[in-house]
Amino acid sequence: MRIVYWTAFWAFLIDQATKYLVVHAMNLAERGTIEVYPPLLTLRMAWNTGINFGLFAEGAASSRWILIAVALLISVGVLYWAYRERPRRAGLVATGLLVGGAIGNVIDRLLYGAVADFLNVSCCGIDNPFAFNVADMAIFVGAAVLVLLPGEKGT
């Protein structure tokens, strides 16, 4: 299980470091947009009070606490599953990515009241209106690997 905790720690740390760098050091919170490699990569500030793609963002103030509780419950559930099932190394890393990303977004909700999203990727004439962050990538990759990984236990 050490690999789960170390992966979660690094996913969390990288997420929080990039958020601090972009939101505060680069002042994206006030600048709004920084074109890095347009149109492929743009830093575009978005405060997400909902879930993926801003769904349920118009909810009551209590939705913040509900989303925090749900993220923490899912994290505990995935950790319990990994402890009980002892998946192979890829499953352990995926579990760490998912948990580290979820905790990163929970910290945002506690500090800012919303998740700090800033990565915007567009390509091929399609203007993507959505932004995401490192935690979102970790959650997506972790969940995808857990879903797609064969259910074999490790040694």
Image: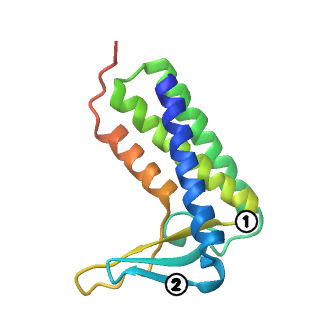
The answer to which of marks 1 and 2 sits earlier in the sequence is 2
Position above or below: 129 against 77: below
Q: CA distance from mark 1 to mark 2?
A: 19 Å
Residue 64 placement: quadrant:
bottom right
Between 68 and 121, the residue placed more toward the observer is 121
Residue that appears at 63% across and 40% down = 73
User: In x, y percent, where is residue 137?
Assistant: 43, 55
Position above or below: 103 against 61: above
Position above or below: 93 against 36: above
User: In x, y percent, where is residue 69?
Assistant: 69, 48
Amino acid type indicated by mark 1 = Tyr
Q: Is residue 83 left or right of residue 115?
A: left
Amino acid type indicated by mark 2 = Thr
User: In x, y percent, where is residue 60?
Assistant: 74, 70
Can residue 48 be seen at all in this image of the molecule? no
Q: Please identify the residue farthest to the top as the structure is shown.
A: 155
Residue that appears at 63% across and 77% down = 27
Tag 2 residue: 33
Q: Is residue 142 left or right of residue 151?
A: right
Residue 66 placement: quadrant:
bottom right
Element at badge 2? strand
Between 45 and 68, the residue placed more toward the observer is 45
Residue that appears at 65% across and 55% down = 67
Structural crowding at the residue carrying mark 2, measured as other residues with C-alpha within 10 Å and reported as few (<14), some (14–19) or many (≥20): some
Which callout, 1 or 2, points to the residue nearer the camera? 2
Q: Please identify the residue farthest to the left as the structure is shown.
A: 124
Residue that appears at 60% across and 85% down = 31
Position above or below: 153 against 126: above
Tag 1 residue: 112
